[in-house]
Image (tube, rainbow, N blue to C red):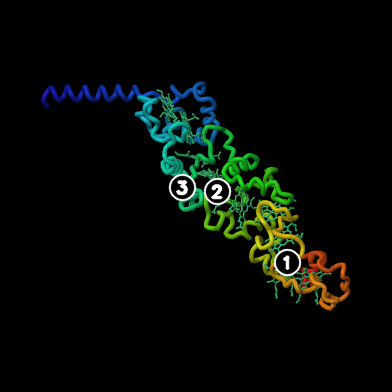
Amino acid sequence: MPLALLLGLLLFSATGQAQQSEQKQCVSCHTDAVNQGLHSIWQTAHGAAMGSGNAACVQCHGDSSEHRAQPTENPPQVSFGPSHPSRVETRNGQCLGCHQGNERLMWQGSAHHTEDVACNDCHQAHTNHDAVLDSRSQIEVCVGCHTPMQAQLRMPSRHPIKEGKTSCSDCHNPHGTTTDASLVGTSLNSTCIQCHSEKRGPFLFEHPPVAEDCSLCHRPHGSVNKDLLISRGPFLCQQCHSAAFHPSQLNDGSGLPSGSGNSSLLGSNCLNCHSQVHGSNHPSGGRLTR
Ligand code: HEC
Ligand code: HEC
Ligand code: HEC
Ligand code: HEC
Ligand code: HEC
Ligand code: HEC
Ligand code: HEC
Ligand code: HEC
Ligand code: HEC
Ligand code: HEC
């Protein structure tokens, strides 16, 4: 080998090494004093799993050699903001690199994916309290975008979401599922029945709409009517049962069941008599009255 070339090679590899060692560590610039709270990441599942120092940083932000050399000229390879956020696809791709499966099997094509919502619109990496994972604080993350929900969550009848006893993610998988509205169950009813199993049946006497779809009578989030009902009194039932039928209409008592021919009952709430509206197991509960 000609001497000049050999020398050249030696020189090249030497400068290569020099460049390598000049590459500053992320944390030597990004101290906790410069970026307050940034190092809380060591108290998270990520910190524990990814090891210390740069090894962790580059897993999410990429190697970022240009940024390390001239940080004010070049943003890191993958930035989640605040100043130069990468495209949503790039950011999400970085997270999905490790989190593709499980709960996120249906992410592609989900409402949030389609609407360009980023993982880090909901999740925070540099905190030991990722608000969206805590049922007490999750609601604020969600209604930050779903502002119309706020009114529903304050209605007289509602799921105890504000109290943290039920959370949005008890019913929804925000990463997407196969159902409408990304419900966690295989259907709306199976979602409700997770917690209200006594409404599942089977009953000796079924009320068909109950097994069909709880939302024929109930709203999921909030309602001005008691028990999250979509409407009040006889009107709820008269979506399906003829209004001309007893006792919603005066019919000289002839349409009334025997013993109840009192006009004061006319138009009163069907539930006064048909109290077992979800189904009855009583031997004579065929009319859902007991
Ligand atoms: C699990 C992925 C992940 C890891 C690991 C990670 N980051 Fe981040 N980083 C993020 C996300 C997401 C944000 C956006 C803000 C947030 O979620 O807290 C961010 C934001 C930042 C910011 C901007 C903060 C601001 O508000 O100005 C800096 C700087 C940063 N990261 C540096 C680092 C450094 C240094 C490391 C290694 C110690 C590191 N990151 C490790 C995901 C990560
Ligand atoms: C030589 C010091 C230095 C090193 C080394 C360095 N950074 Fe930075 N970084 C900065 C400075 C300065 C800024 C602010 C740049 C600006 O706002 O113009 C910054 C900004 C960032 C941001 C915020 C980007 C945004 O969109 O707001 C992230 C994230 C980040 N650095 C991550 C990293 C990671 C990860 C590493 C290691 C791979 C790293 N930095 C190495 C100095 C450095
Ligand atoms: C290099 C692989 C890797 C990358 C990249 C990564 N994670 Fe993780 N993540 C993990 C590991 C490992 C855990 C801890 C074990 C587990 O819970 O699966 C974890 C845990 C989590 C958890 C659960 C935290 C907890 O306290 O239970 C969330 C949420 C999460 N990651 C979101 C993200 C988001 C958002 C991003 C992108 C900003 C991201 N991850 C990037 C590997 C990764
Ligand atoms: C709309 C808000 C939202 C978005 C967007 C979102 N997440 Fe989540 N994520 C949540 C909530 C809420 C939970 C807790 C769900 C639960 O307890 O079932 C969660 C849980 C997780 C977990 C921990 C539980 C598990 O499944 O292992 C990981 C990891 C995770 N998300 C990763 C991601 C990644 C990666 C993205 C982006 C592709 C993403 N998330 C986008 C809200 C969101
Ligand atoms: C960054 C904004 C943003 C955040 C944060 C957010 N969403 Fe969404 N969400 C959207 C957009 C945009 C849509 C699509 C348009 C719509 O339906 O309003 C959507 C749609 C939905 C849908 C309908 C899904 C479907 O399949 O039809 C549900 C359910 C939902 N979000 C639940 C949540 C929950 C639960 C959280 C908190 C864990 C949350 N969202 C946080 C922006 C957001
Ligand atoms: C008790 C279960 C349950 C809880 C808790 C719940 N949802 Fe829903 N949500 C549903 C059901 C069921 C639907 C579908 C309604 C329909 O199709 O009639 C729905 C629909 C939605 C939709 C799409 C349609 C619409 O009304 O805009 C969004 C967005 C949504 N929910 C967001 C949220 C958010 C945000 C939270 C937490 C604040 C939350 N949900 C809590 C059950 C629930
Ligand atoms: C994660 C558990 C959970 C799921 C899933 C769930 N609920 Fe509930 N539901 C509750 C809790 C908790 C209460 C409050 C009970 C109490 O205060 O005694 C409640 C209360 C109710 C009430 C009474 C409201 C009132 O004003 O007193 C109705 C009606 C109801 N749920 C219907 C549904 C329907 C319909 C679904 C499916 C869309 C559903 N629930 C899904 C937990 C759940
Ligand atoms: C035909 C209309 C109708 C359908 C369909 C229906 N409900 Fe109801 N539900 C009612 C009425 C009316 C009340 C209030 C009277 C009462 O307490 O029985 C009620 C009350 C409730 C309550 C609160 C009181 C209690 O009994 O715990 C829960 C929880 C409930 N329904 C859950 C469900 C679930 C879950 C489904 C679907 C499996 C469902 N409902 C389907 C009409 C209906
Ligand atoms: C979504 C439609 C729908 C709603 C709303 C509805 N029902 Fe029904 N109901 C039915 C159907 C369908 C049957 C079965 C009719 C049949 O078998 O001929 C039925 C049967 C009944 C029966 C038993 C009749 C029999 O011959 O066995 C009673 C009683 C009854 N409903 C009362 C009510 C009351 C009270 C309400 C209001 C809380 C109500 N229904 C709301 C659809 C509905
Ligand atoms: C005063 C008590 C009472 C009230 C109020 C009442 N019902 Fe009835 N209902 C009965 C009795 C008792 C029967 C059984 C009659 C029979 O077997 O001949 C019955 C029967 C029915 C049947 C079954 C009819 C059939 O063809 O077998 C339906 C459906 C029904 N009621 C719906 C309603 C609706 C809807 C309302 C409210 C608009 C209502 N009921 C209010 C007592 C009542």
Residue 276 lies left or right of residue 89; in this view the side is right
The residue identified by callout 1 is 237
The residue drawn where x is 49% and y is 52% is 110
Q: Is residue 282 visible?
A: no
The residue drawn where x is 26% and y is 22% is 15
Q: Position of residue 90 (x, y in %)?
A: 41, 41
Q: Is mark 2 within 8 Å of ligand 4?
A: yes
Amino acid type indicated by mark 2: Pro
Q: Is residue 173 above or below residue 268?
A: above
Q: Position of residue 132 (x, y in %)?
A: 58, 41
Q: Is residue 174 above or below residue 274?
A: above
Furthest toward the bottom, the residue is: 254
The residue drawn where x is 83% and y is 75% is 256
Amino acid type indicated by mark 3: Gln
The quarter of the picture where residue 11 lies is top left
Contact (Cβ within 8 Å) of mark 2 with mark 1: no
Q: Is mark 3 within 8 Å of ligand 4?
A: yes
The residue drawn where x is 58% and y is 41% is 144
Amino acid type indicated by mark 1: Cys
Neighbour tally class for label 2: few under 14, some 14-19, many 20 plus, Cα within 10 Å: many
Q: Nearer the viewer, residue 165 or 268?
A: 268
The residue identified by callout 3 is 100
Neighbour tally class for label 3: few under 14, some 14-19, many 20 plus, Cα within 10 Å: some
Furthest toward the left, the residue is: 2
Element under disc 3: loop
| Marked residue nearer the N-terminal end (2 or 1) | 2
Q: Is residue 133 above or below residue 237?
A: above
Which quadrant: the N terminus? top left
